[in-house]
Amino acid sequence: MDETTADVTVLRREVRLLRHRVLYLEVALFRAVVAVGAVALVLGYFLPFLSATEEAGNSDEDETIALIPAIAGLADAGDGPFRGEAAMAAVVVGGFVLVILVAFIALVQLFRDRVSPRTVRIARVFGIILLVVCGVAWLLVFALAGHSEGESSAFSPATLSITIGGAVTILATALHPGDWRD
């Protein structure tokens, strides 16, 4: 073996090692993006969806509405002529919670070693649905803030967190290379 053949062999080995390092970094970065999205979606369940402003008065009652307790609370809130509207609001909020859960499951599926293109498409579809639903939720938050005459905040930490989770879901499906895990 002459000197140039040995140099080429060494260079090929170094290129192979560099490819593995780059692949490791790509996978680590992708999984970090997926983890941020998953955490944002989970936080959306627990952060306040609506919160009272300081103008609402100082009461001993809870001044925030979280997403999951709102489902049970909305259905029971509509006594009298607004019973149907309260039940419909509970169904809408329940659907929102379900879309978040499905998007979270689809996002977590991207952590697996073998991810099919179908899984990536499903995650993308539910990410898009989640962003559309978040747009409706933002409109609802702004409408409620405008209707409450300054008693509720126009900022919704839960909706922001879920919007970030939906955007990261779409980003993760766009970044997901099909040839990583050979």
Image (spheres, rainbow, N blue to C red):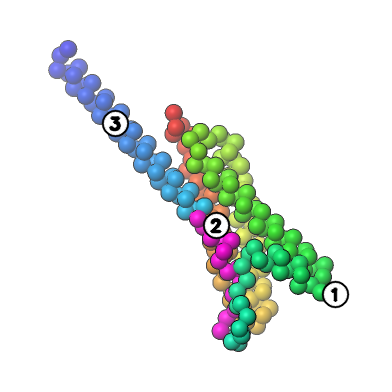
Q: The magenta stretch spans which residues? A: 39-54
Tell me, yes or no, whether the highlighted magenta stretch contains residue 40: yes
The residue drawn where x is 54% and y is 46% is 107
Cα separation, mark 1 vs mark 3, equals: 70 Å
Name the disc covering residue 42, or none: 2
Q: Residue type at mark 2: give it.
A: Val
Can the viewer see residue 137?
Answer: no
Residue 131 relative to residue 9: left or right: right
**Vertical relation: 48 (above or below) 3:** below
Q: Quadrant of the N terminus?
A: top left
Name the disc covering residue 8, or none: none
Q: Which residue is farthest front?
A: 60
**Vertical relation: 108 (above or below) 65:** above
Name the disc covering residue 81, or none: 1
Q: Which picture quadrant has residue 58?
A: bottom right
* Location of residue 14 in the rendering, given as x and y in whole percent from the top left corner: 25, 29
